[in-house]
Image (spheres, helix red, strand yellow):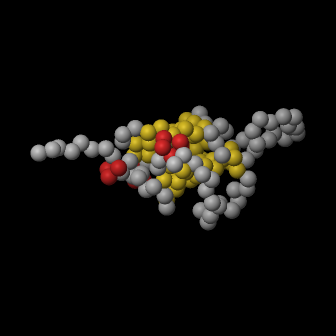
Amino acid sequence: MTLLNTLIPTFSRAPAARDQHRPADLGPTVKPAYEIKETTDAWGVTVYLPGVAKDGLEFTAEDGQLRLIGRRAWKQPEGWTCLYRESPDAAYELVLTHENAIDTDQIAAELRDGVLRVSLPKHEAVKPRKIAVS
């Protein structure tokens, strides 16, 4: 078991296989920077998506996967020549797999200033509980 799996055992950061859920017109993508934090009730995921607006964001949760696709809304001005660019002009794609320990009906997400914050509540079965001894 790797150090990552001991810290966050329910998420896999391995690249996901390209499958039928990926849009055909997406083209080349960039994996955004992100952080995962865990509490007793939920996991919190923070994803950094500079240049992405709410209408350019697609977030789905199905089949043990969380898939995020963010398209940037910026268009190159007419007659403008790029001399140097720090980031490629490609869409963001992030796929996280999990062990179905997330209550998908209670997922909440908020995008503000290019930062997406997602709350992934745990199923009641995986939450720690106190057992009374008689």
Residue at horizontal 27%, vertical 44%? Answer: 129
Is 83 placed above or below 25 here?
above
Q: Quadrant of residue 40?
A: top left
| Residue 102 coordinates in the image, percent (x, y) | 42, 51
| Residue 121 coordinates in the image, percent (x, y) | 40, 46
Q: Residue furthest front?
A: 1
Name the one closer to the observer, 9 or 101. Answer: 9
| Residue 26 coordinates in the image, percent (x, y) | 69, 56
Tally of numbered discs: 0
Q: Residue furthest bottom?
A: 20
Name the one closer to the observer, 131 or 96. Answer: 131
| Residue 64 coordinates in the image, percent (x, y) | 49, 58
Q: Tell me the quarter of the image containing the C terminus.
A: top left
Is 7 placed above or below 24 here?
above
Is residue 18 in view from this perspective? yes
Relative side of 30 to 94, left or right? right
Name the one closer to the observer, 20 or 40. Answer: 40
Residue at horizontal 87%, vertical 34%? Answer: 83
Residue at horizontal 43%, vertical 56%? Answer: 100
Is residue 44 in view from this perspective? no
Name the one closer to the observer, 101 or 49. Answer: 101
